Amino acid sequence: MIQIHTVAAAFSSEECAHITTLAETAPATDAGLTRNATDHNLRRADLVWLDEVEGSNWVMDKIIALVREANRQVYGYDLTDFSESAQVARYGADRQGHFDWHSDIGDGRLASRRKLTMVVQLSVPSAYSGGQLELMPGAGTVTADTAQGAATIFPSFVLHRVTPVTDGERRSLTIWCHGPAFR
């Protein structure tokens, strides 16, 4: 089975709150798919790209260290860069926020180079119902740690989804690390 790596408390509750506040100060866009396509049956969320938010540079420094260590310990992939900005997603019950089964590797110039995905839980679990990050690394599903600050790291080709949020709102931070095509 393909390994799903979890780093408990990768971000402190204060750091999660700070990232959430930064995201709330920026204009959000409707979450799309690759190549600027939109399909609300597949994905419904609001996004903020952190590279567009002043004062968020420290987040990337922390992300780089976490992914570097996970790759060293678990994956050993040939990684070269982070070609895309980190995104903060808001999945709200008001919009039945969700993201159906998908993988993060796509046809686009950047999406085709994604090798590792990291999702950090920014919300406290009591802030919402539903909204589980589920992964399918093999024949069964695995539910990601919902503790605030937990980072779930996995190969970008692994199928995963966020189940519909039925109450409250779930916020998460997502980033992809890039490299040459898998062989």
Image (tube, rainbow, N blue to C red):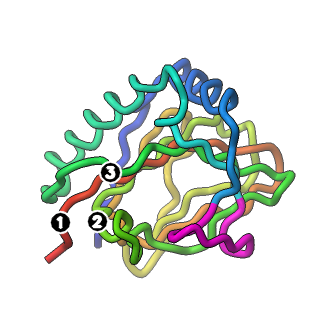
Q: Residue at x 61, y 72 (%)?
A: 37
The residue shown at (20%, 71%) is: 181
Measured Cα–Cα span from mark 1 to mark 3: 12 Å
Compared to 71, does 21 lie above or below?
above
Question: Which element carries disc 1, helix, strand or loop?
Answer: loop
Residue at 62% across / 30% down in the picture? 20
> Disc 2 and disc 1: Cα gap in Å?
6 Å
Give the residue pinned by disc 3. 83
Residue 163 in picture, x, y percent from top left: 67, 63
Residue 96 is a magenta residue: no
The answer for how far apart the CA atoms under marks 3 and 2 are is 9 Å
Task: Name the secondary structure under disc 2.
Answer: helix
Say which mark, if any, is on residue 29. none
The amino acid pointed to by label 2 is Arg
Of the numbered discs 3 and 2, the one sitting upstream in the chain is 3
Residue 180 is marked as: 1
